[in-house]
Amino acid sequence: MSSRINHFKTRRPWRFSPHHWRRRKIAASILLLLLISITLIWNYASGQERIRLQTIKSLEILTGGRVEIDQAWLELLREIRIKKMRIYLPANIKNNLQDIPQRQQDLVLSAEDVIIKHDPLSLLTRQLQIKQIIAQSPELHIWYDHDRKITNIQ
C-alpha cells in the first residue's frame, strides 16, 4: 500500500510532461503561422489601390459609363468609402454628341463622399458585388439641347 502512495507522490503531473510542452509549442507555432497568413491575405485583399480598381471596374459595369475615383478604402468589412467619385458618359453616347463642349457633355454624376456596401467575400474573388450605394452631396449633371432635342442621358 505504501509503495502505491509513493508512486503517486513521485510521479510528475501530466501538465509538466515534456510531451505536453512540445505539443503546446507546435500548437502555438501553427496558430502564429495562421495569424500571419490571415494578416497577409487581409493586406492583399484590402490594399487601397486594389480596392479602388475593383470599385471602378464594378461601378463601370453597373453604370455603363466611365468612372473616376480619387481615393477608396475598406471600412469595417462590408463598406468601401470613396472620396470624390465622378461618373462620365459611355463612349457610344459621346460619339453622338461631338459638337457639344467636352466638359459639359461628359460628366453625369459626381459626389464628394460615397459609401458602398458589398459582399465581403466578393473582394477575394475580384468580382465586387455591390449591395447598396450611399452618396453624400451628390450632383447630377443633366443638360438638354433645345435645337437638337437631346439630353446627355438617353
Image (spheres, grey):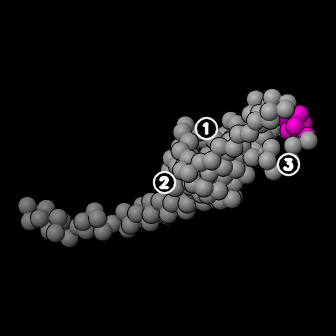
x and y percent of residue 64 in the render? 75, 35
Q: Tell me the residue that label 1 is attached to.
A: 129
Upstream in the sequence, badge 3 or badge 2?
2
Q: Residues within 10 Å of mark 1 (few under 14, many from 20)?
A: some
Real-space CA distance between mark 3 and mark 2, rounded to the nearest whole angstrom: 38 Å
Q: Nearer the viewer, residue 81 or 43?
A: 81
Earlier-in-chain disc, 2 versus 1: 2
| As drawn, 32 above or below 141 | below
Q: Quadrant of the N terminus?
A: bottom left
Q: Main secondary structure of the magenta part?
A: helix
Crowding near pointer 2: few (<14 within 10 Å), some, many (20+)?
few
Q: Nearer the viewer, residue 77 or 31?
A: 77
Q: Percent x, y for residue 152?
A: 77, 36
Residue sitting at x 18%, y 65%: 7
Between label 3 and label 2, give the one nearer the viewer.
3
In the displayed structure, does residue 20 sit left or right of residue 114? left
- Residue at image position (40%, 63%) is 24
Mark carried by residue 52: none
Q: Residue at x 47, y 59 (%)?
A: 31
Q: CA distance from mark 3 to mark 1?
A: 32 Å
- Label 3: element kind: helix
**Magenta highlight range:** 92-98
State the residue in front, 133 or 40.
133
Crowding at mark 3 (Cα within 10 Å: few <14, some 14-19, many 20+):
few
Question: Mark 2 sits on what residue?
Answer: 76
Q: Position of residue 52 (x, y in %)?
A: 68, 53
Residue annotated with mark 3: 102
Residue 113 % position (x, y)? 57, 54
Task: Check the image and name the residue furthest to the front.
Answer: 147
What residue is drawn where x is 87% and y is 37%? 97
